[in-house]
Image (cartoon, helix red, strand yellow):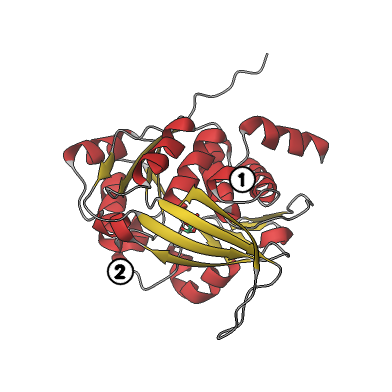
Amino acid sequence: MTVEPEAPAIVVLGSINMDLVTTTARRPVPGETVLGSGFAMVPGGKGANQAIAAQRAGGAVRFLGAVGDDVFAAQLRGALTDAAVSADRLRTVAGPSGIATIVVDDSGENSIIVVGGANTRMTELTEDDLAAIAAADILLCQLEIPVETVSAAARHAHAHDTTVLLNPSPAGPLPACLWADIDVAVVNSGEAQQLGAVLDAVAHLVVTRGASGADYRGPDGARLSRPSPRVGVVDTTGAGDAFTGALAAVWHRGPEWALTWACAAGALATTRLGASSSIPAREEITAALVAE
Ligand code: RIB
């Protein structure tokens, strides 16, 4: 009999956006107008996507973030609760929710502009937020909320032996002291280049390489690479989030298992349109790995 380990308690601190997704044969160059082929509104945001991905992949996830008091708020909250992510720490602030304008072309590649809205108001952590972080196995963060909040959360997590996973996306200037509190960094190859030597300070580094899979470098210099399963790509939006959330959910099983599992989750997410709408369930990930 195989005994499944208990679901890891994961706190995701991050953004939640309404994605306004337009599909088109090809993305316009500056100054050009092209005709689109479709439009959809899909809940997204790197934080919410990763929270849903971690929950679907087997974690027990609580989300810390903010929505506005606009027409999108209820749907955004519903996207978390429908996925069984705990949203009791999701606040409502005055003003608009986060919005992402996304254009996806026929090759599945995208361009994204995020207007932070309520996410920019995630400037404080309450006593309850800090208690949730201290009690969790993993804190998972990205950079679509103020970096000061991410730094404070990481410091608190580190002081309470909660493993800190950072997906520094979108990549930007970060306080040097933040890196001392990060146990695992998950970056794509562009972010790895942009961030450069600061990543050397991180114990566990995971670099995603799209359809080519992912690489890992451990604290003892151990290295491994995992390929990505071959799939028909519809939309790459949220694939990195599916990867990162799945990685967090199985990190306790070790990097080899975690990379394999996360590569399958990321690949499956590219086979459907949208971000949160494309994130695979645990059973799908398992089936994809068995079929390999
Ligand atoms: O990583 C994909 C996400 O980036 C989208 O859901 C969008 O909201 C932006 O945050």
The quadrant of the image that shows the N terminus is top right
- For the point 18% across and 43% down, which residue is it? 126
The quadrant of the image that shows the C terminus is top right
Q: Position of residue 109 (x, y in %)?
A: 65, 65
Residue nearest the observer in this picture, 52 or 196? 52
Left or right of residue 175, residue 167 in this image = right
Q: How many marks?
A: 2
Decide if residue 256 is in sight here: yes
Decide if residue 185 is in sight here: no
Q: Position of residue 209 (x, y in %)?
A: 66, 62
- For the point 23% across and 41% down, which residue is it? 130
In terms of secondary structure, where does tag 1 sit? Answer: helix
Q: Position of residue 132 (x, y in %)?
A: 29, 35
Residue nearest the observer in this picture, 150 or 271? 271
Residue tagged 2 = 175
Q: Earlier in the sequence, mark 1 or mark 2?
A: 2
Classed neighbour count for the residue bearing mark 2: other residues with Cα under 10 Å, few (<14), some (14–19), many (≥20): few
Residue tagged 1 = 278
**Mark 1–mark 2 contact, CB under 8 Å?**
no
Q: Alpha carbon of mark 1 to alpha carbon of mark 2: how far?
A: 33 Å
Q: Is residue 60 above or below residue 211?
A: above
The three-letter code of the residue at mark 1 reads Ser
Q: Position of residue 273 (x, y in %)?
A: 64, 51
The three-letter code of the residue at mark 2 reads Pro
Residue 12 location, quadrant: top left
Left or right of residue 213, residue 33 in this image = left
Classed neighbour count for the residue bearing mark 1: other residues with Cα under 10 Å, few (<14), some (14–19), many (≥20): many
Looking at the image, which residue sits at the far bottom? 31
Left or right of residue 107, residue 124 in this image = left
